[in-house]
Image (spheres, helix red, strand yellow):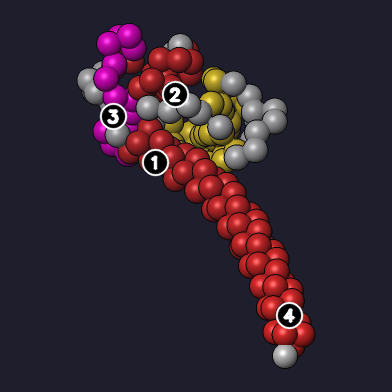
Amino acid sequence: MKKNQNKKAQIFSIDGFISICFCVIMIIFVMSLWNLYSLRLNENIRAEEVELLSFQITDILAKFEGSPPYWQNDPENTSTLGLNDGTGKLDEKKVNAFLQMNYTSVKRLLNIERFEYYMEVRDDNGNLLNSSGMNATTAEHKVSIVRLSLIGNSTRQLRFTLWD
């Protein structure tokens, strides 16, 4: 009778060991899946943040005059950037003042200190007329927004690129 009890105890020990191993393997599997999906989610969030911010910046620059309305006369005392002349067109003096401004000042005024930007102004044939900022050579999350706008009576492409 004692022999049967010993065998049952051994089977229980092996069964317990297999259960523990299975649980550990499942925990490792779930943790690695969790890590993989959390990394993908964080990458998607960063990419969407750059994209949304690019759209917001180009909207602000194209639709608002800035503050004060004639900030191009004194760019150092600007509180808000805007390139619109008040009639729906872009003001050539404001565009030129923006392109000549200090890189870090523009980043501070646009509240994009942790990002880099590059802005180009092209004619309707795609020829580069002027640019400002840092050209993105290698960037993981880079978004370029192109807007067609009127400056005077000429159509211009404004290409704003933002990356982290």
Q: Could you say where residue 9 lies in the image, as x and y percent from the top left?
A: 69, 78
Q: Kindly identify which residue carries mark 1.
A: 56
Q: CA distance from mark 2 to mark 4?
A: 71 Å
- Tag 4 and tag 1, C-beta contact below 8 Å: no
From the image, state whether disc 2 or disc 4 is nearer to you: 4
Q: Is tag 4's residue or tag 1's residue first in the polypeptide sequence?
A: 4
Whether residue 82 is visible to the viewer of this picture, yes or no, is yes
Mainly helix, strand or loop, the magenta region? Answer: loop
Q: CA distance from mark 2 to mark 1?
A: 15 Å
Q: Kindly identify which residue carries mark 3.
A: 65
- Tag 3 and tag 4, C-beta contact below 8 Å: no
Q: CA distance from mark 2 to mark 3?
A: 22 Å
Q: Nearer the viewer, residue 49 or 130?
A: 49
Q: Nearer the viewer, residue 121 or 37?
A: 37
Q: Which residues are magenta?
A: 74-89
- Tag 1 and tag 3, C-beta contact below 8 Å: no
User: Identity of the amino acid at label 2?
Assistant: Glu
User: Identity of the amino acid at label 3?
Assistant: Glu
Q: Is tag 3's residue or tag 4's residue first in the polypeptide sequence?
A: 4
Q: Secondary structure at mark 2?
A: loop
Q: Nearer the viewer, residue 159 or 142?
A: 142
From the image, state whether disc 2 or disc 1 is nearer to you: 2
Question: Looking at the figure, which quarter contains the N terminus?
Answer: bottom right
| Residue at point 22%, 20% (across, down) | 68
Q: Where 87 falls versus 20 (above or below)?
A: above
Q: Kindly identify which residue carries mark 2.
A: 113
What label does residue 6 carry, if any?
4
| Residue at point 73%, 80% (across, down) | 6
> Magenta stretch containing residue 87, yes or no?
yes
Q: Is tag 2's residue or tag 3's residue first in the polypeptide sequence?
A: 3
